Image: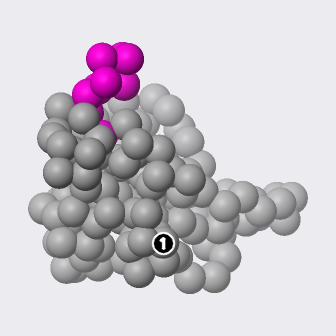
Amino acid sequence: IVSAMEGLDADVLGLIEIENDLDDQSTADLVQGLNDAMGAGTYDYLATGSIGTDQIKVAFIYKPATVNLVGDFAILDSSIDDRFIDNKNRPALIQTFEEISTGERLTVAVNHFKSKGSSCDALQDPDLSDGQANCAQTRADAAD
């Protein structure tokens, strides 16, 4: 994964399927691998600690030489919008970045919605055989 990410050479990367540890060690390990390959300090990570209650979470890594963090990160979950069903979607992570060279800002959200293979029958959101599989409305509501 490090070589693939190195090839992208992105200023900001949103990540999914990151271990949801309290101290961000999984994200820090990934950044260390990138920095070992690309040079010390090439990437840093947004320290969030644990997000939600799932075993995995979303995360951001970024190049501190090209972008700055602006303000605190935000979490989108059911405490913000009750249509976002916490046990059917992982909380979304939102952060604003500022490009150092231009001062332009960009706000990015990284999402990891409910799997199409998971059941949402209890929410009356079954597979409608329309190509979207299970939980289509649940995912749409979380994105809205």
Q: Is residue 44 above or below residue 79?
A: above
Which of the two residues, 122 or 119, is positioned nearer the viewer here? 122
**Residue 65 at least partly seen:** no
**Residue 126 at least partly seen:** yes
Query: The residue under label 1 is which amino acid type?
Result: Asp
The answer to which quarter of the image holds residue 65 is bottom right
Helix, strand or loop status at disc 1: loop
Residue 77, horizontal then vertical, whole percent = 40, 70
Look at 26% across and 72% down and name the residue there.
Answer: 52
Q: Is residue 134 above or below residue 31?
A: above
Q: Is residue 132 left or right of residue 108?
A: left
Look at 19% across and 58% down and name the residue there.
Answer: 56
Residue 33, horizontal then vertical, whole percent = 28, 50
Which of the two residues, 78 or 53, is positioned nearer the viewer here? 78
**For the N terminus, which image quadrant?**
top left
Magenta span includes 132 = yes
Which of the two residues, 136 or 57, is positioned nearer the viewer here? 136
Q: Is residue 71 left or right of residue 129?
A: right
Look at 30% across and 17% down and name the residue there.
Answer: 129
Q: Which residue is mark 1?
A: 81
What range is drawn magenta here? 127-135
The answer to which quarter of the image holds residue 55 is bottom left
Q: Main secondary structure of the magenta part?
A: loop
Residue 119, horizontal then vertical, whole percent = 15, 41
Look at 72% across and 58% down and name the residue there.
Answer: 106
